[in-house]
């Protein structure tokens, strides 16, 4: 009787340890091993078939690989649906995501062998290219979610986005007051900096972190070195404003890099499924 609580404790410990393991390494790389076996089996099968011309999408082996590929693509595309249902065990979200990544990569081998290395300007090649696009954007997504959250956390320094904006607003109030004694030209540059939208620059600015029209940088550059007390005060505040803007912009850039791949990955997946449908229908129509 006394051993049961201990067993339960050990199970809880195992579960907690598993929770800290990357989804890529889930169950000691289970899905990587499955994907590798699948690639090796299909590759060896293709190599051993004694047939001229070599097997392609129109051969029995091509149909077999095509069927495997279609089933995998449809199943892998259901990850978004799976995310709405929380569960543990063999088909936990971590297990499903691990399978999504590794089996998705195996499609490079399966899909390429299915084509028989025959590429042309047709719906069949379109489906193949879209599949590769989905896989490439998926690889980027894995890299982004493996590396960027830590960078995002480090940049935030325990501040929320709202708190970063509040800190900038506090600097702006001080800067507005400190700029009053300046001459008209300098004052206008500071006012232009204060009036510029914090989020200007659009999608390009967010993704690249490049803001060539930054009014704060322009105002800071225009201030003379070794000025009077009022000018030195403004320089100090403009420097603080520039640093705070840099933190906000890094935050926006990292968030953009985390999210941008989805704007390609999801539409490309939808387009892939549509192209696959056209590919399958055309194959059976002309069969």
Image: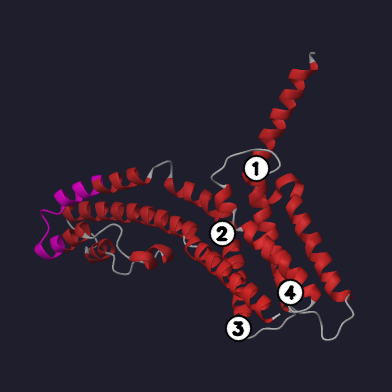
Residue 122's tag is 3
Mark 3 and mark 2 lie on one chain; the one further toward the N terminus is 3
| In this rendering, the label closer to the viewer, 1 or 2 | 1
Marks 3 and 4 close (CB-CB < 8 Å): no
Q: Secondary structure at mark 2?
A: helix
Residue 159 appears left or right of 95: left
Q: Which mark is residue 56?
A: none
Distance from label 1 to label 2 (Cα)?
20 Å
Left or right: where does residue 9 sit relative to residue 269?
Answer: right
Pick whichever of labels 1 and 2 is earlier in the sequence.
1
Quarter of the image with the C terminus in it? bottom right
Q: Nearer the viewer, mark 4 or mark 2?
A: 4
Question: Between marks 4 and 2, how big is the CA–CA gap?
Answer: 26 Å
Q: Earlier in the sequence, mark 4 or mark 1?
A: 1
Q: Earlier in the sequence, mark 1 or mark 3?
A: 1
The magenta region covers 170-188
Foreground pick, 286 / 85: 286
Image quadrant of residue 228? bottom left
User: In this picture, is 25 found above or below 46?
Assistant: above
Q: Secondary structure at mark 3?
A: loop
Mark 4 or 1, closer to the camera:
4
Q: Quadrant of the N terminus?
A: top right
Identify the residue at image location x=65%, y=42%.
92
Q: Residues within 10 Å of mark 4 (few under 14, many from 20)?
A: many
Please tell me which residue is depicted at 86% across the width and 70% down the height of the picture: 44
Disc number for residue 141: 2
Q: Tell me what residue is drawn at x 22 percent, y 66 percent.
A: 222
Q: Which residue is mark 4?
A: 114
């Amino acid at each position: 009787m006394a051993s049961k609580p201990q067993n339960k404790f050990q199970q809880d410990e195992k579960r907690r340890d598993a929770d800290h393991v990357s989804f890529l390494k889930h169950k000691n790389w289970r899905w990587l091993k499955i994907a590798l076996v699948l690639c090796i089996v299909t590759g060896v099968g293709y190599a051993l078939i004694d047939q001229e011309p070599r097997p392609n999408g129109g051969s029995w082996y091509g149909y077999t690989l095509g069927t495997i590929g279609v089933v995998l693509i449809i199943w892998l595309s259901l990850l978004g649906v799976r995310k709405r249902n929380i569960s543990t065990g063999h088909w936990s979200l971590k297990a499903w995501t691990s399978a999504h990544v590794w089996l998705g990569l195996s499609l490079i081998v399966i899909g390429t062998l299915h084509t028989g290395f025959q590429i042309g300007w047709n719906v069949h090649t379109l489906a193949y290219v879209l599949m590769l696009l989905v896989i490439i954007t998926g690889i980027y997504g894995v890299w982004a979610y493996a590396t960027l959250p830590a960078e995002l956390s480090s940049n935030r320094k325990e501040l929320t986005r709202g708190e970063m904006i509040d800190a900038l607003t506090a600097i702006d109030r001080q800067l507005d007051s400190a700029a009053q004694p300046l001459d008209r030209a300098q004052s206008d540059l500071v006012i232009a900096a204060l009036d510029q939208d914090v989020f200007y620059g659009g999608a390009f600015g967010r993704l690249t972190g490049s803001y060539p029209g930054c009014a704060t940088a322009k105002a800071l550059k225009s201030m003379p070195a070794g000025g009077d007390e009022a000018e030195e005060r403004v320089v100090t505040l403009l420097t603080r404003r520039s640093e705070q803007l840099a933190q906000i912009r890094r935050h926006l850039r990292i968030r953009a890099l985390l999210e941008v791949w989805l704007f390609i990955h999801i539409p490309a997946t939808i387009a892939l499924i549509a192209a696959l449908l056209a590919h399958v229908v055309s194959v059976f129509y002309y069969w």
